Image (cartoon, helix red, strand yellow):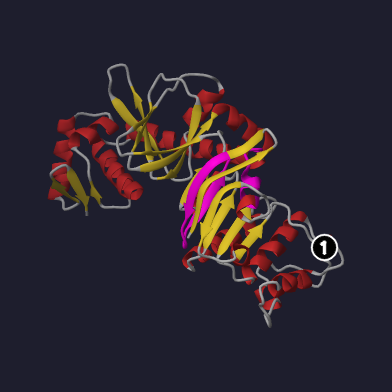
Amino acid sequence: MIRIEKLSKSFGSKVVFKDISLEFSEGNVYGIVGENGAGKTTFFRCLAGLEVCEGEIITSLKPFKNHLGFLIAEPFIMTKITGKEYIRLLCNARGIKNIDIEAKNIFDLPLNQYASTYSTGMKKKLAITAILLQQNDFFILDEPFNGVDIQSNIILTEIILKLKELKKTVLISSHIFSTLADTCDEIHLLGDGGIKKSVKEGDIILQEQSYLNSIPIVLSGSIKVLRTDEDGREILLYYIKQGESCIMSFLGGIHQDTSKVKAIAEEDSEILFIPIHAVGMLLKEYPEWLEYIFSLYHKRFEELLDVVNAVTFKKMDQRLIDFLYKKVEITKSNVLSITHEQIATELGTARVVVSRLLKQLEEMGSVKLGRNNITVM
């Protein structure tokens, strides 16, 4: 376990970060996010002992540097040294001998070629291979996915999950939120670029007609998005799951418009709120963000078409069945804690209609009705 207490760093009068207190446990993966200049790299260098800082870093790993594998964002490779020699040099520094480097070449690198001739992505993959073979206990990976091809990103994700399985501790920085959400147990924000918030089931995240100052990204859990008509009746539009955001919030925020939807926590969730101004910066600096937004737009458009199709062409009994199966998929449980009134609200119909249809489904053996819960068979 690594515990950080009131870690602070300044360059002259410029405060990079102040009073950071965190705890990193073995077998967990932690994400660090923040805008450019928020101090992510400086924070990592302080942890690695490469920068003088204030505060305490408490660990049972002594000396910590001998248990640490640190991947910097742009690895430095000495000239006139081959990829194989680079790996052997780093392994020798940990006293690891007689290792079959060729057999451990997971990225299929040209190890007998001078590493100085490698591309940026190849240098990063070489450095990753070397720190893995050092058999470290704690890994700091500064933007590991940046500049690396898609196939290698998939391999790297699998490696991170394997390290977690081996009870290693991994600390990652990245601007690709979907990747962090796929791999991290916790995500921490560095700087004032956003707010991470824990919400309880039923908490209202966003009200209709409210102005949007930030974009929510679901780190864990799920959110349901609803629309209300003039008579106060609601209809469920779609769910936002882990690693996803609300495209309606994004469009409203960019155009400085009020929200046209309401968002409610479907279950206990962790949400990262990114300020609108920071989203604009991310879109300019990182093409991956634009891909992320377009993929969300495509997915939400298809889901909205499904809603229109259901309301227009499907009978209420089929809509109810589809709704129950979707709930099971979202909650990962076939026992749904929900009332007939709540179902009616989300489907935009009357409670008596829902109760009648549920009774029919129970008689057919499709569901089992309980007090404020429904078991989908």
* Spot occupied by residue 183 in the image (x, y as percentages of width and height): 50, 55
* Spot occupied by residue 205 in the image (x, y as percentages of width and height): 38, 31
Does any portion of residue 70 appear in the rendered image?
yes
Residue visible at 60% across and 71% down in the picture: 135
Query: To which residue does mark 1 refer?
Result: 78
Does any portion of residue 190 appear in the rendered image?
no
Please give the range of residues in magenta.
Answer: 18-45
Residue visible at 51% across and 57% down in the picture: 58
Residue visible at 14% across and 32% down in the picture: 352
Which one is nearer the viewer's eye here, 2 or 89? 2
Q: Which residue appears farthest toward the right when viewing the image? A: 80
* Spot occupied by residue 291 in the image (x, y as percentages of width and height): 61, 40
Which one is nearer the viewer's eye here, 86 or 6? 6
Amino acid type at image mark 1: Met
Which one is nearer the viewer's eye here, 262 or 11? 11
Residue visible at 46% across and 53% down in the picture: 185
Please tell me whether mark 1 sits on a helix, a strand or a loop. loop
* Spot occupied by residue 36 in the image (x, y as percentages of width and height): 65, 38
Q: Magenta includes 349?
A: no
Q: Which residue appears farthest toward the top when viewing the image? A: 230
Which one is nearer the viewer's eye here, 236 or 82? 82
125 lies above or below 199: below
Which quarter of the figure has residue 269?
top left
Which quarter of the figure has residue 275?
top right
Specify few, some or many for label 1: CA neighbours under 10 Å numbering under 14, 14-19, or 20 or more: few
361 lies above or below 282: below
- Horizontal side of residue 56 vs 111, given as left or right: left
